[in-house]
Image (cartoon, rainbow, N blue to C red):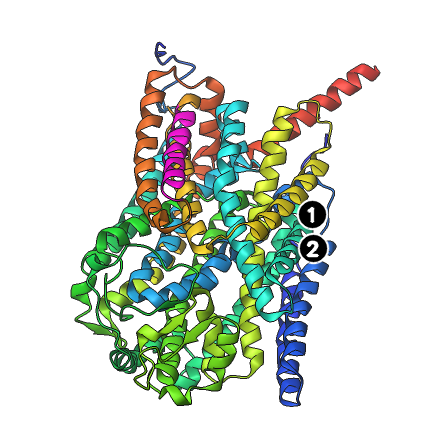
Amino acid sequence: MATETPTSDHPAIPTGDHPARDRHQIQTLILAASILVVALAAVVFSVTFAASLNRYGVLYFPLGFYLLAQGLLIFIVVLAFWFVRIQERIDLARSQGEGL
Amino acid sequence: MRVPSRLRTPNPHLGAYYAIVTSAFISIVIVLAMFEQLGWGKALIAQTMMLGPLALYLVIATGTRTYDAEDFFVSGRRVPAVYNGFVLAAVAVGGVGFVAYTGTVFLLGFDALAIGLGWAVGLLAASILFVPYLRKAGSYTLPAFLGHRFRSRSLRIAASAMQLPPTALLLAAELKLAALVAALFLPLSFSIAAIMVAAIIAASVLLGGMRSLTWTASAQFLIAAVGLVAVVTTVSVLLTNVPAPQFTYGSLFPALQNAEIGAGVAPLDPGTVAIMLPGQDPLPTVKPLLQAFGFIGPFDFAALFLCLAFGMAALPTLLARSGVTSSLADQRRACAWGLLFVALFVMTAPAVAVFAKLLIFRDIALAPASSLPAWLAELSQSQLLQAGDANGDGSIAAGELFIKRDGVLFALSPGAGLPYVFAVLMGVSALAVALAASASHLFTLAASLSEDIYRVADPRHVLPQLIAARVAVAAVALAAAVFLIIADLDPLSAALLALSFAGATFFPVLLLAIWWRRFTKWGAMAAMGIGFAVMLIEAVFGAGFGKAAFNAPVASLLGILLALAAGIGVSFYFARPSKAEDDYWEEMRDPEGETIYDRAQWRAAATASTSAAATEQ
């Protein structure tokens, strides 16, 4: 089946007529990707070095065990609430930008 | 046509209501603890404690009945964020997590942490990638969202059909755990308990749908949390003198390691055992709790973690709750609250496992076989634990001590020598969270069958919307009860398979549908179909719920990769999305305003009233 070409009333990408909207979408994408990459990187680091980290202790726990059992969970919860706060600011900036 | 209400004010007395519910429950527990000391029998205490909360759930469900479609399917879109967080956490953890995850940490130790971590990261991914956009879309079900996004009825029906296996498996797993717990504390056979539990969850959603489900599950979450915290904190005080189990169980590791060495638990080589999660039959402890990657190697640990994260992120039952809050920002906060509650449970489960392991090994494995404690006989009668001096050396080693994975939670309180009320309290908690999760899966399944299959396939709508949904609820609950009576299902394996199905089938299609403007209907069909087909092949040819179920994570990850490739490839091959699809995608990303679905309903209602007025003139 043939592929349609973009037309003026059916743009393939944001056209720049809505700067607040486009900025909002880019910031939202960057925020989402950053948080997920940071969370996954923290998990990968903790799993990869868990056995080595277990040689060190924190609060009576071996460090590798502690990270996977508690540390990462606390970090992820903090990330989730931080995401809510930042995303609300981004949303507010869009509504103010569109209201002007 | 019924016009959705614009009034989104939550009940200002909710906090008072739930404070009363929680206080009443705590008071009943305290009174029963006193009656136990005064000589009440165990059976009477168990029946009072189990049946009291069940009656409360039914009262809440009846009191929140509704005849309004918006109330029935999305709880009127006025659930406060924290309460939605309660229900999200109850669904994410479920009875399987509450009971089986604790037992799995007991048996596998460090290696089981992949499960809890997978849930948490999955919820985070859902709250960032999917939930805000599903809230803006406002569709009542996940298949309905896909149908609206791509303007396709066939895609909606296909998505509903592919949603069946994961949701039905989770429903069966949660129901089975609820029935097992009910049969443990009430004088009921498993079959009768399964029928009773199925009837209770059907009653919970039959009259009020999502509305009664939300308020019943909130009470269930609070009761489960109170029960777990009361028992684990009491044991923590007994063992460590500090009422903060999550942070103090580390101080018991030296004693636990000594007990494990004394009982003959030696470190394992990851390559020497078949890779699988513990089943539902009693098993010996085969590895030290702290040994990293002794039973599950790092690759399988990562595969299990990723599979559960993707599955949790795309779980239809969780995503169906995306439309119940009053605003998009509230929905994000609800996810963060839900994640917090899940994280608190996941941090508590290893504490339970460590306490239980230390108590059991100290009292059984290190004591002479001739002087075993009395509580062992009780647990043996309940078939939660079996110990015997098989080699006749006068003591019981780890290899002679068989513990049921789903019995660890209930062994904690008798092992610590606590009154019987505490044991029942743990049972009430497990039953509450299993009921909340199973009712949610039941509603998701029934709502999808009625809204996405029946109402789409029958444009004449012979059955009214709410009648069709209620018939579907009753039929699914009946089918689940019958299935449980005739089939032997391991809840943990079934839940793992269900999450693998959910991840492979829905994660790629949702990711592309929400984040890629160029994604098309046929791309969505290909992505869902490929992911589902890979998991179906694994489930059918991989011995279903047996030993091969652990291969489900690898199959799920493979399915996700293939589905992403298929979705992108097919979308590029076919024509661009229509203007309507493009506008929907753009509208979905606007955080302001009412949901797209509600606005469409209002427009339709306005058009209908204008036409009616014109006809009258």
Instruction: For mark 1, give the secondary structure.
Output: helix
x 42%, y 41%: residue:
B501
Q: What element carries label 2?
A: helix
Q: Name the residue under label 2.
A: B61
Question: Could you tell whether B280 is left or right of B257 in the image?
Answer: right
Provide residue B470's location: percent of width, then percent of height: 69, 41
Crowding at dot 2, Cα within 10 Å, few <14 / some 14-19 / many 20+, comes out as: many
- The quadrant in which the N terminus of chain B is found is top right
Is residue B533 a member of the stretch shown in magenta?
yes
Q: Secondary structure of the magenta portion, mostly? A: helix
Residue B39 in view: yes
| Disc nearer the start of the sequence (2/1) | 2
Give the residues drawn in magenta, as a range. B523-543
- On the image, the x and y values in percent for residue B165 come to 49, 40
Q: Nearer the viewer, residue A53 or B35?
A: B35
Give amino acid for label 2. Ala
Are discs 2 and 1 less than 8 Å apart at CB? yes
Q: Nearer the viewer, mark 2 or mark 1?
A: 1
Residue B221 seen in the current view: no
Which image quarter holds the C terminus of chain B?
top right
Q: What is the total number of numbered labels drawn onto the structure image?
A: 2
Where B212 sits versus B219, above or below? above
Which residue is at a point 47% across and 63% down the rendered structure image?
A: B98
The amino acid pointed to by label 1 is Leu
On screen, residue B508 above or below B414: above
Relative to B480, say whether B158 is above or below.
above
Name the chain letter of the residue that bears numbered label 2. B
Question: What residue sits 63% from the left and 30% below the top?
Answer: B454
